[in-house]
Image (cartoon, grey):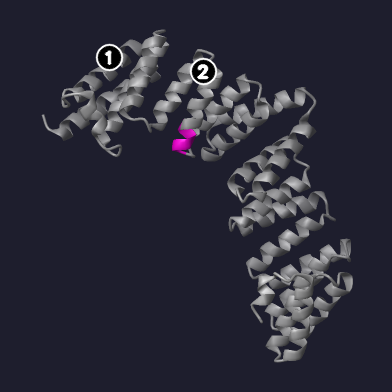
Amino acid sequence: MSTKIFETLSQAMLARGWNLVERKQYDEAFNCFQNGIELIKEDFSSDDELVEVTTNNERKQIFTDLLLGKAYCLEYLEKSEEAFSCVEYSLGIWPDSERAWVAKGFLLKNRKEFVEALRCFEKAIEINKDSEDGWHNKGNVLGFLGRYVEALYCFQRAFEINATNSLSQFGMRQCQAVIAKAGVTTEVANECYNQGAELAQLNRHEEAIRWYKCAIDLKPIFPYAWTGLGTSFMQQGGFEEALSYFEKALAQDPKFLEAYINKAYALIQLDRLDQTINTYKLAIDCNPQSAICWNGIGRCYYLQDNYDRAIEFYDKALAVDPSYYKAWKNRAEVFIRQGNAQKAAESLKRCLQIKPDFIEALFYL
């Protein structure tokens, strides 16, 4: 029989097997999976030969899926040891099978061997960072271990991968309910925020985003978390989405300077200079001692080739904080554009006196 026919028949048995599982006809499903396994094994002289097949080989994928289907049936037929052996055999054939590691974790979870199950789900996620089953089941196990904050993060990740996953959404709500019942919602929300902030400092923004979302799920009125969320999106180039989060932060705290500054940064990246100027002006209304905001307005005017206005606002920044070296550097740039070498040199000198290693200023020397 040709290889293609083998694969077609095996795929048909795999599909029929899972159809029978959905009907809870586990004996019939087991037989279907077993027949598919035997059909493939007929074409190999040994397991060693099967292992040597490249991991991209379709037949190898079908074979391991048949083994996992068989293991699933055995577990529901209360033949746990045989199910476990079947999964181990599958991993022997394909050690990097995400689904096999999820299956092994599932069996260990049923045995209440939660720590070992956790390692399996983490292995599945290591193989595929977008393993929905890996994240969801990891969340379940962490819940059993009483680690609800970490579980919430995992359910959040699974739901992010598949927004139709009602079980992960339910898991998130369960974690939130347990945390609320314990009366520690604010403390846990702050813990999630701090975890996000630490990851953001390490430029691990995808992870930071999930922790910020966990914090917001627990404590929706949390301008710091909304701003952190926006900042991490912005660092990944998601400026439009970032703006919506900064707006939410400012709706909750209209005097939150960091949200204004980050919103202005997102706007300037989108070349919305007039909106950027207005945002900085709103920030200055709340905090007129912000050299960053005065300097930001100057930068916008510089980008609009309005050099006199740029100098005016750089000077206002320096009136507030004479040690703000970026304003000195920006001031020098204007004078360079205007051909005033003497004033440019004076501004660069002041900048480098404050920060001798400022590369952007050294560039002009």
Q: Is residue 200 above or below residue 14?
A: below
Rounded to the nearest angstrom, the CA distance separating label 2 from label 1 is 25 Å
Name the main secondary structure of what is drawn in magenta. Answer: helix
58 or 84, which lies in front? 84
Q: Find out whether the residues at labels 2 and 1 contact each other: C-beta distance under 8 Å.
A: no
Element type at mark 2: helix
Task: Please name which of the two marks, 2 or 1, marks the residue nearer to the observer.
Answer: 2
Q: Position of residue 305 (x, y in %)?
A: 69, 83
Return the mark for residue 109: 2
352 horizontally vs 60: left or right: right
Total marks in image: 2
Circle on res. 198: none
- Image quadrant holding the N terminus, namely top left
In the picture provided, is 144 more to the left or to the right than 321? left
Asked if one can make out residue 131 in the rendered structure from this viewpoint, the answer is no
Q: Nearer the viewer, residue 114 or 303?
A: 114
Quarter of the image holding residue 209? top right
Please tell me which residue is depicted at 76% across the width and 47% down the height of the picture: 224
Q: In the picture, residue 221 is in which quadrant?
A: top right
Residue 251 image point, x, y percent: 79, 52
- Magenta segment range? 124-128
Residue at the limit of the structure toward the top, as seen here? 78
**Residue with the mark numbered 1:** 31
Residue at coordinates 30% horizontally, 27% vertically from top-left? 93
> Dot 1 surroundings within 10 Å: few (below 14), some, or many (20 or more)?
some
* Residue 65 place in picture, x, y as percent: 33, 27
Amino acid identity at mark 1: Asn
Q: Secondary structure at mark 1?
A: helix
